[in-house]
Image: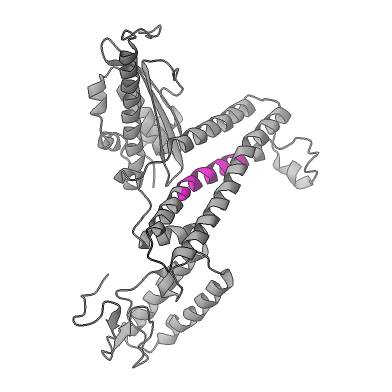
Amino acid sequence: MAYSDKVIDHYENPRNVGSLPKDDANVGTGLVGAPECGDVMKLQVKINPHTGVIDDAKFKTFGCGSAIASSSLATEWLKGKTVDQALAIKNTDIVTELALPPVKIHCSVLAEDAIKAAIADYQKKQQQDDKAGVPVGAHAGPTA
Amino acid sequence: MTPDPIPLRAPSMLECRNCGAGVPLDDHFCGQCDRILALGRHGDYFSFLGFPRRLSLDAQTLERRFRELSRKFHPDYFYNSSPTERLASLERSSYLNDAYRTLRNPAARIEHLLAIEGLPPAKSDEGGVKVPPALLEEVFELNEELDQIRESREEGGDRETLRRRLDAAREPIDRKRVEHERQIAGLMERWDAQSEAQSPERKATLEALRERLFERKYIDNLIATIEREAAEVRPDTAPIQPTGKARAEDRS
């Protein structure tokens, strides 16, 4: 099964590889895996707590070309989106954009799971901060 | 795949399409007319080969049973038979090959058992069972370390240092693999001890087996990455592998 040009492009020139400070209150981290192929994917978002907009997104994926391309594309899409818009991203959008074959659909599911996990992590952190009485945005990094 | 159910017969029985006699589900030949039976509704790989649903399976016994049945089903013996029988011989031969290949491999054997006991491996696109987060974190960190070793090698890092780092990275993975094998072996034994009884613990054993299988692919991938990297950082002047072959393979 041949990879589409878009998958190859993301695989050869992955966007936004790297990591964001995990302990930053405005950073959400999602770590997900697909046991049937042994893939592991980490996706992080940095959210501006005042606007709810995703300022930055990074990923690191150990897996096949489709898994790398799916997470690379996801980070591209996430930047500039609000949390609600980000949660509206469906794995089928990734499948369409990358023309993934049926056997690789689970890679796009993994990327969607990673987005949801990263945002859930961010929201959990914010709630904890609220409880602790820390003003929202007190941990905002230099870019916020 | 499954033929219409035969009325007024026990579900474990089938009907011989040649003489109409009732035959047990896992028989291969009709007890009355001796013809090969069409492969309609059938049991599982264990019962097809005449084994109980146990996980310990002697390799020689399996091999012997496979050869015996291969001879009996071989399409050459049905060259002059009816089309139905020729088809049955092909179908039984093919199913036998699948059964043999699956049961021969312990991990595949466990997967088959899970499937026939109603616990198929969770597909992530069906939102099934999730990988334990602690395992993911561990795997991610080990992968990152291997990735850094690769980057350092590509930038011309000191081979001896890289080899030491690789050995250090290999150690926890090797330990994990040994522990994994030990746990699988323990669970296999437990299942075999429980398999006669209708106890609720049987399901717990199967679920524990399924969770262990999750680890397997990750461990295999990590080991494959290490092996690839180890081949790259092999000594230039090979004091450990002083063979001409090892030097010839080192292209640096």
Residue B104 visible in the picture:
yes
Across the whole image, how many numbered discs are drawn on residues?
A: 0
Q: Which residues are magenta?
A: B212-227
B195 vs B68, nearest the viewer: B195
B18 vs B172, nearest the viewer: B172
Residue A116 is situated, as x and y percent measured from the top left of the image, at 31, 30
A51 relative to B215 in the view: left or right: left
Residue A18 is situated, as x and y percent measured from the top left of the image, at 46, 22
The picture quadrant where one finds residue A96 is top left
Residue at horizontal 38 percent and vertical 62 percent from the top: B199
Which quadrant is the C terminus of chain A positioned in?
top left
Against A4, residue A139 (above or below) is above
B168 relative to B9 in the view: left or right: right
- Which residue occupies the extreme left position in the image? B7
A51 relative to A62 in the view: left or right: left
Residue at horizontal 48 percent and vertical 33 percent from the top: B137
Against A42, residue B17 (above or below) is below
The picture quadrant where one finds residue A70 is top left
A65 vs A36, nearest the viewer: A36
Residue A48 visible in the picture:
no
Residue at horizontal 58 percent and vertical 72 percent from the top: B60
A57 relative to B70 in the view: left or right: left
B178 vs B72, nearest the viewer: B178
- Which residue occupies the extreme bottom position in the image? B33
Residue at horizontal 35 percent and vertical 72 percent from the top: B43
Magenta-colored stretch includes residue B219: yes
The picture quadrant where one finds residue B200 is bottom left
Residue B114 is situated, as x and y percent measured from the top left of the image, at 40, 58
